[in-house]
């Protein structure tokens, strides 16, 4: 059974660094083709993909936030992480992590087949 | 970036009806398209991948079709539990992008 669960600080102030953790079970980030992504959703709004990390440590970032994002993983402990620097109120959102189950025939990551429950992050002074 | 234009933004239909949601990509995405269902207060759940493949456990009244830049999600025999928002997403190329969503209500 695949499960993912996000954790984070809840609330932080503008200009601080947001650190998020995705703890998962039912799969391994050392398995060929497996990736984990971060996606966020401001309240009542749409979904925005942020970053992806794959089993062999390749990474992809959304260019709109690239300079502020760092994704990493701890394969031994079944966790993935996301850091966002210099947050402001626009970063207030629910943050999800999700699994990508494999790659397409060209080696590109596929869809998100399992999602965590999400963690609410509020940026406020 | 590949833009995903989803329509309609909202939809109201009666139980038992068939509804269709459309998604148009700004360029050919070669069937690299998924549909997700998000119920109020919950995380998105995968319905369809590769434009027309049903994810494990998803009822067969959901189906996907399309190719190139035009894709659609059809829900046959609408049930009360289908009240949700629906999002399309392209994974053909980075950055992955989502449609703006369709909110489905029961009339």
Image: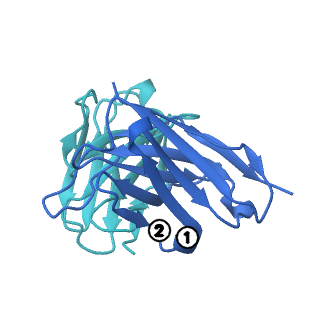
Chain colours: A blue, B cyan
Q: Among all residues in the image, which is located at the extreme left?
A: A105
For image coordinates 12% across by 59% down, the residue present is A105
Q: Position of residue A48 (x, y in %)?
A: 50, 59
Q: Quadrant of residue B91?
A: bottom left
Give whichever of A118, B31 is nearer the camera: A118
Visible residue check, residue B99: no
For image coordinates 42% across by 52% down, the residue present is A37
Q: Position of residue B64 (x, y in %)?
A: 23, 47
Looking at the image, residue B40 lies above or below residue B21: above
Residue position for label 1: A65
- Horizontal side, residue B22 vs residue A95: left or right: left
Residue position for label 2: A62
The answer to whether mark 2 and mark 1 are in CB contact below 8 A is: yes
Q: CA distance from mark 2 to mark 1?
A: 6 Å
Neighbour tally class for label 2: few under 14, some 14-19, many 20 plus, Cα within 10 Å: some
- Chain letter of disc 1? A
């Amino acid at each position: 059974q695949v499960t993912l669960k996000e954790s984070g600080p809840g609330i932080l102030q503008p200009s601080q660094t947001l650190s998020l953790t995705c703890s998962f079970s039912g799969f391994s980030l050392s398995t060929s083709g497996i990736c984990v992504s971060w996606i966020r959703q401001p309240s009542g709004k749409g979904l925005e993909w942020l970053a992806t990390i794959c089993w062999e440590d390749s990474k992809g970032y959304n260019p709109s936030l690239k300079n502020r994002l760092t994704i990493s993983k701890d394969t031994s402990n079944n966790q993935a992480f996301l850091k966002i620097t210099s947050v402001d109120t626009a970063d207030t959102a629910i943050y999800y992590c999700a699994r990508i189950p494999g790659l397409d025939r060209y080696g590109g990551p596929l869809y998100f087949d399992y999602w965590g429950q999400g963690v609410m992050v509020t940026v406020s002074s | 970036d590949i833009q995903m234009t989803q329509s309609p933004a909202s939809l109201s239909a009666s139980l038992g009806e068939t509804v269709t949601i459309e998604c148009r990509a700004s360029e050919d995405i070669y069937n690299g398209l998924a549909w997700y269902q998000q119920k109020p207060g919950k995380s998105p759940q995968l319905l369809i991948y590769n434009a027309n493949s049903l994810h494990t456990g998803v009822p067969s009244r959901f189906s996907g079709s399309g190719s190139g830049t035009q894709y659609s999600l059809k829900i046959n025999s609408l049930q009360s539990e289908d009240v949700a928002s629906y999002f399309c997403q392209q994974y053909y190329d980075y950055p992955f992008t989502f449609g703006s969503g369709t909110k489905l209500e029961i009339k």
